[in-house]
Image (spheres, rainbow, N blue to C red):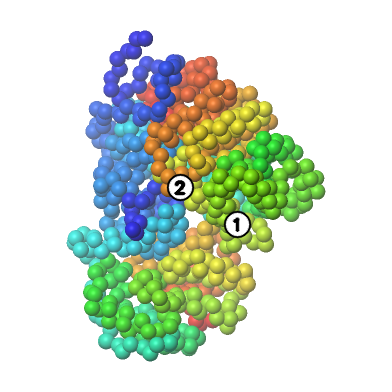
Amino acid sequence: MHIPEIELGTLPPCPVAPDALQGIPRQQTNPSRWQGSTWDAFVSALQDDGIEVRQERGSQGIYLTDAGGMAHGLPHGVVMAQSAQQIASLLRHAQHYKVPVTTRGGGLTTEGESVAFGGVLLDMTGMSRVVSIDSESLSVRTEAGIYWHRLAEELRKEGLDYLSAPLNMTSSVGGTLGVGGIDVNSSKYGCSADQALSLQVVTPTGEIVECSDEQNPELFQRVILGYGQFGVITEATLQIRPFTPMRMHYFYYRSLRTALEDLQRIDASGSCDYSGILTMMDKAITLLVAFDSPEREQAFMAQQHSQLRGHGELIFAARLAAYYLLRPWRISELLFLYQRKKNLFPDLQPPHHMRDGEIVDRTVVFSRAVWKHWGNKHMVIPDLATNVDKIIEAVEAGNAVCKKHFRRYTLYCVGIKLRPEHQAHYELSSIPPDAAGFSYGCEFEPVLEAEHYSRDQLQSFKNAIYDIGVEKQTSYYRFGGMMKGYIRRALGDEVVEKHLAMKRQADPAMILNRDVIF
Amino acid sequence: MAKNFSHCHGCGLCTVVCPLWQQTHDVALAPHGHAKALQFGGEVNTSSLFDCLLCGACEPVCPEDIPLMDLLLGLRRTAVTRGDHTPPAQPSAPLSAQPMPQGDSLLVVDDALLQQPELSAQCQALLNTTLTADNGSDIAHALHHGIEIETDRLAAFLNSIKQASTLIVSDGLLKRAIQQWLPRSEVLSMGYALSRLPAIQHKLGSNDLYLIESRGYHADFSRMVSHYDTLRQRRGCELNLDLQRLAVATGGVGADEALLCQQAAWLMKGLNVNRIVVESLDDGAVMRQQCDLPVVHVAEL
């Protein structure tokens, strides 16, 4: 095979080689670092425009890695986002001097997508203001660097809430709209990106453009779920809703398949407002359902409850005890389950976040639990996304991979309602093209606790999960998007070529978020 | 071994609750930024260290349980020792005081409250306690401004209060430090002690915004959050708590006035109250600037 020589730190003629995966052990490696030949002239041009570039050592350490903790890289300099005009100027100069620009919000990517390997890191959290809230039309206009948690704080003052957001307080709005985002109410509202009504975008060549499904729809379709390839989202108008506390119920299962079947049935019925599965390995599987109102709760209990095959806590505990009584050599597993439940469940319903049996501030409750019980220097959460028919076999295959790699792990699975009118938004996304009605996503999360695993082992685990997506001809969803090495297999040549051509046209110097997928 | 900045995984939860970040949106100024700068062998921005309100909201949210307040205060001391920052002149130590008899409850009030003799007498009467002769104001000043505390002076201060069964302290930062220095003593913030009194609680209503003193609150978060949550449920008053039940700080020694006013403005947004009740005189001063509503100290209810 002939490999053409390319200048170090630049992109090859085809940035997504068709045979990128063949015969290569798929360990993630850092992209090559941009060498900085035009850096000084670029900085000088920015300074002439009044744009501050931070180059001192202390200010760079914050951006060394992302939540995944696997990829490490440094920018030549950091620019704090201040306005669309500032970013437009930055991108125009970056095109001219061919300087890579990496955008970063909360830095919650897991494969280094928000890590800069040279060039400029654009920290979008500098743009974190809420512009306006319209409580009549139920929409909010916000700068896109804002964390969902901060947005929730602002909306709550008006008795309002966002529709759906990742269960993580430090995800940014712009980053989420670029990749999708799932919540426990995604079976009702769709992925987080579906709540975007319109966007202000700075294109890679520095034009400031307002776009929506009506205005500049092609740009809107490319930017939503576009992995930051076609523009920087600077402001977003989002659909919102009145705030409601949440009434939660848990049902316990011993079988992943049974729990998933029940989850799918209740999602299809539209009878609950929140649903999902959270497991402790494949031994204790919890189906959680929750409601925005007592009326919805009562209707569910009257019509759906009797059809669920899960049990209440006491019956499940008795069955589990019987299971381990016959397998005394696995007592440590039982102790883990007991300890985990004892530690985790109180954090899912802390008294000061409860009112009359309802959870207020679910954003806080779940996010804190995520960081406390799953947080680590490596956020290892590879996901699979499938259509309705493939989810059970995909989860079972993923479960087998988890068992092979780790003693303790968790699965988190939710349904995502697909919006037919948004089909064009999903084209480059991880929502499988063969999904209709609902898509399902499952995260596979090792419980690392005090155990030490090498980066290689963690990456091998993640790749083994992504391989399931490839083998089963489905997709996977990850914080940060889709790994570059997998994109042709996941999306197919036709889609990749189409978007690569559009990317080349929109971003001639290929400077914006390079190496994320292109 | 105590955790330090090297244990920070970079989750950023301390950033979203940091008043300095909330007003500047610059992560380099938040504890997360300090931790990563140090991990990377860089320097912490000295002015941001002293712009910090020391409200302590970052500490209870840290999933790694890193003692962020101790570390931030340590960074301040280092900056002063190295001459990177010049602290304001330290007040002289109060005259030496005799140790109090064992079993008494003692009230340690800050200088601002001492300058209002009627109010401090009212606090003392409500709490049925004795004012200390030595209020440790020089020690509180040193804590705030990163000045090393002389060992003999600290020993003398602690010796004068350590026999008390309960120590009630109005300065949240001093309260936090005394908690660490005298781990066997019961140390309460004055606002908490007052707000426990039924006579006070009955005077609070749904038209009140009650401002919890943030430093004392965050230093004892798990106990405080439960107490104030109960208070809100019983009396229906609004509290200066955010969605994480952390206290929105509006006061701070040496803090930037514009920053405090922005905090206060954000706090007042969307609230429909007729009166503001404060535990700390610092908070009261800022709220008087920010709105026309009557502002009263909790002991004045």
Q: Residues within 10 Å of mark 1 (few under 14, many from 20)?
A: some
Camera-near label (1 vs 2) is: 2
Distance of label 1 from label 2 (alpha carbons): 22 Å
Residue placed at 41% from the left, 64% from the top? B55
Apparent side of residue A254 relative to residue A200 in the rendered image (left or right): right
Q: Quadrant of residue A125?
A: top left
Q: Quadrant of residue A508?
A: top left
Apparent side of residue A314 relative to residue A409 in the rendered image (left or right): right
Amino acid tagged 1: Gln
Determine which residue is flagged by label 2. Answer: A449
- Is residue B185 in view from this perspective? yes
Q: Report helix, strand or loop for mark 1.
A: loop
Q: Report helix, strand or loop for mark 2.
A: loop
State whether discs 1 and 2 lie on one chain: yes
- Image quarter of the C terminus of chain A: top left
- In the depicted structure, whether residue A427 falls above or below residue B129: above
Tally the numbered discs: 2
Residue placed at 45% from the left, 70% from the top? B213
- In the depicted structure, whether residue A476 falls above or below residue B128: above
User: Residue B238, position in %: x, y?
Assistant: 57, 67
Viewer-side residue, A312 vs A494: A312
User: Residue B32, position in %: x, y?
Assistant: 37, 51
Determine which residue is flagged by label 1. Answer: A349
- In the depicted structure, whether residue B261 falls above or below residue A26: below
Protein chain holding label 1? A
Q: Closer to the N terminus: mark 1 or mark 2?
A: 1
- Image quarter of the N terminus of chain A: top left
User: Residue B209, position in %: x, y?
Assistant: 55, 70
Apparent side of residue A191 relative to residue B182 in the rendered image (left or right): right
Q: Residue furthest top?
A: A1
Apparent side of residue A353 relative to residue B10 in the rendered image (left or right): right
